[in-house]
Image (cartoon, rainbow, N blue to C red):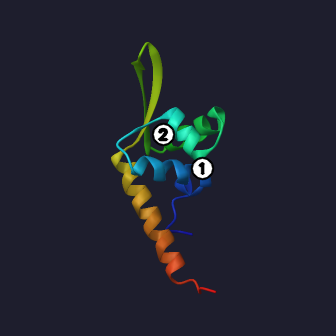
Amino acid sequence: MSGLDLVIHAPVRLRVCALLAAAESAEFAVVREEVGVSDSVLSKHVRTLEEAGYVTVSKATVSSRVRTWLALTPAGRSAFAAHVAELQRIVAGAPVG
């Protein structure tokens, strides 16, 4: 598993990265709903991605409510792309059926 990024490889973090890779940014609540985890579980995984330099967290006030936004950094996009490429390489050699 040398080509896999173990920070990204955890299922929740992989789903978060996949979701964020498809957008410039996403609101925390949207990511939470799409990934299907609690606030605390998502916060823990986002913190791990943030510490690795893969995700940025920003806050903005929208209609007098503070909203949290998540975005992949350029390093996060690169790491996610490399991780997906390695997964594709692995499954390409797997027998089907």
Counting residues from the N terminus, which is met first, the one under dot 2 or under dot 1? Answer: 1
Instruction: State left or right for residue 29 relative to residue 20.
Output: right
Name which residue type carries label 1.
Val
**Residue 45 at x, y percent in the picture:** 58, 42
**Which residue is outermost to the front?**
63
Name which residue type carries label 2.
Glu
> Which mark is nearer the camera, 2 or 1?
1
Q: Residue at x 64, y 41 (%)?
A: 37
Whole-number angstrom distance, CA of label 2 to CA of label 1: 14 Å
**Residue 51 at x, y percent in the picture:** 50, 40
Q: Which residue is mark 2?
A: 50
**Residue 81 at x, y percent in the picture:** 40, 60
* Quadrant in the picture for the N terminus: bottom right
Where disc 2 sits, the SS reads helix
Q: Nearer the viewer, residue 51 or 65?
A: 65
Q: Nearer the viewer, residue 19 or 79?
A: 19
Instruction: State left or right for residue 73 relative to residue 6.
Output: left
Q: Tell me the crowding category of disc 1: few under 14, some 14 to 19, or many 20 or more residues within 10 angstroms, Cα based.
A: some
Q: Nearer the viewer, residue 65 or 69?
A: 65
Q: Which residue is mark 1?
A: 12
* Quadrant in the picture for the C terminus: bottom right
Q: Residue at x 47, y 19 (%)?
A: 66
Where disc 1 sits, the SS reads helix
